[in-house]
Image (cartoon, rainbow, N blue to C red):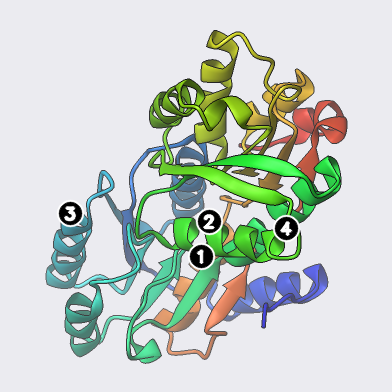
Amino acid sequence: MKLSPSPACRSALALGLALAHPALALTVGFSQVGAESGWRTANTSSIKAEAAKRQVTLRFSDAQQKQENQIKALRSFVAQGVDVIAFSPVVETGWEPVLREIKQAGIPVVLTDRAVAVSDPGLFATFIGSDFVEEGRRAGRWLAQKTGGKAVIAELVGTPGSAPAIDRKKGFEEILGAHPEMKIVLSQSGDFTRAKGKEVMEAFLKSPQGRQVTALFAHNDDMALGAIQAIEEAGLKPGQDIIIVSIDGVRDAFVAMAAGKLNCSVECNPLIGPQLFDLAAAVAAGQPVPHRVPVAEGVYDQSQAAAALPNRQY
C-alpha cells in the first residue's frame, strides 16, 4: 500500500525532527548515482545546499552510474567514521554484503530516491523517495485518457536493473492490461540520458514497427527530450504525430510542454534535501522514523505548463 500522509502530516514530521535535533553536529556520507539528467543535478543541488544550510559535514561521492564505485564509496564512509550513510543506489541488487558491513559498524543507512532488494529490511533505517510504480500508473492513465485507450507505443526504458526502470515499467504495463488496444511494440533502454534517448528513438523510427508508433512513454524527461530531437529530425511533429508522456517534471520538460512538443510529465520531486537531513538527524540520535517516507508529487500536461513554468525550481 502506498503511504500518502497529508502535507500537514509531512510538515509536522519534518518540523518535529528538526526541532528534536537542532544542534546535532552531523557528518553524512552520501553516494550519488551520477549526473545523468537534469533531475539528478537538481537532486544533488538540493542535498548539498541543505547540508551547507545546516552546517552538516557532507562527504559526497559521484558514482558515475557504476555500482562498484558506490560500494567503494560506502566502505570509505565506514572507514571515515561518518555518523550516517545515505545513498541513491544505481541498481536494486548486490548490496547485502556492504550493507551488513555498515550495520556491523553501527552506522545507520538512509536510502534516497531508489530502493534496494535485500533479505533483511533492517539493513537500512529508512527510505525516502517516490512511488515509482504509481508514477508508471499515472503515465499510463494519462495516456489512456489522451488516446481513448488506443495507442501503438514505443518505450524508452531507464537504466536496466534500476528501481525506477523496473517499477515505472511495471506500473505502466499494469494500466495497459486494462486497455487491450494499447500495445508496446518497441522497448529499449535509453539509460536515463538525453543522448541515448535520441539515439534509441532514431533507431526506433527507422524500423518498420517504428513507423506505426503513435505514442512514446519515456521513463524520464531527459530521454523524452532526446527523443523529441530525433522525431523532429525525422520530419515528424512531436506532441502531435507522436503523443509523448514522460516522468520527472524537470524545467526543460515544462519548456517542451509549453512549446507543444511534450504532452505530459509525471512529477518525481528531486528536492529532498530538507527531508533527508531531518531523517539523518533523527536516525543519528537513535530516534524511530518511518521505514518509508514518501515525496509529494503531481502530474502536469501541456495545458498547465506555461503557467507552472515560472515556479519550477528544477
Q: Is residue 124 above or below residue 224?
A: below
Residue 291 spot, x, y in % from top left? 52, 84
* Residue type marked 1: Leu
Residues at circles 3 and 2 in contact by the CB criterion of under 8 Å: no
Measured as percent of width and height from the top left, residue 274 is found at 57, 60
Mark 4–mark 2 Cα distance, whole angstroms, equals: 41 Å
Disc 4 from disc 3: Cα separation: 43 Å
27 on left or right of 226: left
Tell me the SS state at disc 1: helix
* Distance of label 3 from label 2 (alpha carbons): 22 Å
The answer to which of 285 and 244 lies nearer the viewer is 244
Q: Tag 2: Cα neighbours inside 10 Å, few (<14), some, or many (≥20)?
A: some
| Number of the label disc, if any, that sits on residue 276 | 1
1 and 3 marks in contact (CB < 8 Å): no
| Any part of residue 55 in sight | yes
In this image, 80 relative to 302: left or right? left
Q: Which residue is mark 3?
A: 69
Mark 1 surroundings: few (<14), some (14-19) or many (≥20) residues within 10 A: many
Which kind of residue does numbered mark 3 sit on? Answer: Asn
Percent position of residue 2, x then y: 67, 77
* 2 and 1 marks in contact (CB < 8 Å): yes
Q: Nearer the viewer, mark 3 or mark 2?
A: 3
User: Which dot, 4 or 3, sits closer to the camera?
Assistant: 4
Quarter containing the N terminus: bottom right
Residue at x 19% of width, y 89% of height: 104
Q: Is residue 131 visible?
A: no
